[in-house]
Structure formats: C-alpha cells, structure tokens
Image (cartoon, rainbow, N blue to C red):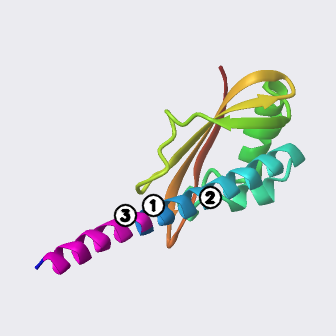
C-alpha cells in the first residue's frame, strides 16, 4: 500500500512539473509574438504586425488601422520602441485570454505601458489587441 502512495505522489508532482513546463512554453511563444509585433511597429510593417492578430480580429487588423493607430498616433506620441520590462503583477499568462503587460521605454516617452491581449485562434494564441499608454 505504501508503494502505491509513493507512486501516486510522484505522479502528482510529475503532472505539476509538466503543467508548469507547458505554461512556460506558452508564455515563451506569447513573448516571441510580442517581439515580432514591436519590431514590426518600429519598422512600420503593417503586414507583419497584422499577421500576429487572430482571424476574429480581421476587421481591425488592417493596413488603414495600423497606419492610423500605430504609424501616426502612437509613433507621434511615444516614438520608436526601445526596451521593455515585464509588469508581472498585471500580467496573466494563463487561461483562454492571456494578457502580457510591460513597462516600455520609447524614443519620445520614458515610461509607456504596453498591453497585449491574446485569444485562442485554433490551436494557438494570436493577438486580440495591442495598446501603448504613457504612464
């Protein structure tokens, strides 16, 4: 009986370790998407930027929206992206709609809150919304 208990406890801890690894892998993928978005933002590359969006967001993930919100408004207000650090207390990297939040530094603003909402799109997470807000 004791052997069964030890096996059950080991299975439980192994399952927890696997869940943590899966969550970490998902967060890494989300962070990779953030890097692609910020690079595309700096380069004014609407096609690459919009390719990160979920299919359900096709109505807003257009070149016209990118030009207005990011090329014109954000670039005029905060400038080019330079660096970021995670705001872990505001980040929720699990569940069906993860949210990654950073404090970013831009060429025209020292402190900008970068928020990226994700949503499930088939088997992967894609962007639902990106905001830059001076802090």
Q: Secondary structure at mark 2?
A: helix
* Cα–Cα gap, marks 1 and 3: 6 Å
Q: Which residue is mark 2?
A: 28
Magenta stretch: give its range.
2-17
* Image position of 29 (left or right of 46): left
Crowding at dot 3, Cα within 10 Å, few <14 / some 14-19 / many 20+, comes out as: few
Q: Secondary structure at mark 1?
A: helix
| Nearest to N terminus: mark 3 or mark 2 | 3
Residue found at the very far front of the displayed protein:
2
Query: Quick check: marks 2 and 1 in contact, CB under 8 Å?
Result: no
Where is residue 56 drawn, in percent x and y? Answer: 53, 60
Q: How many marks?
A: 3
Q: Residue at x 80, y 43 (%)?
A: 67
* Cα–Cα gap, marks 2 and 1: 12 Å
Q: Answer whether residue 12 is magenta in the image.
A: yes
Q: Which residue is mark 1?
A: 20
Q: Quadrant of the N terminus?
A: bottom left
Please tell me the numbered disc located at residue 16.
Answer: 3
Q: Quadrant of the C terminus?
A: top right
Looking at the image, can residue 58 be seen? no
Q: Quadrant of residue 10?
A: bottom left
Pick the front one: 11 or 5 = 5
């Amino acid at each position: 009986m004791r052997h069964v208990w030890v096996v059950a406890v080991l299975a439980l801890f192994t399952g927890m370790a696997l869940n943590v690894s899966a969550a970490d892998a998902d967060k890494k993928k989300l962070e990779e998407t953030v890097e692609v978005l910020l690079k595309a933002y700096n380069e004014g590359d609407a096609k690459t930027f919009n390719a990160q969006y979920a299919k359900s967001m096709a109505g807003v993930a257009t070149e016209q929206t990118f030009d207005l919100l990011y090329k014109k408004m954000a670039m005029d207000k905060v400038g080019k992206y330079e660096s970021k650090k995670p705001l872990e207390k505001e980040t929720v990297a699990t569940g069906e709609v993860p949210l990654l939040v950073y404090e970013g530094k831009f060429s025209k603003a020292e402190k900008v809150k970068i928020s990226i909402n994700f949503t499930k799109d088939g088997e992967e997470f894609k962007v639902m919304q990106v905001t830059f807000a001076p802090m």
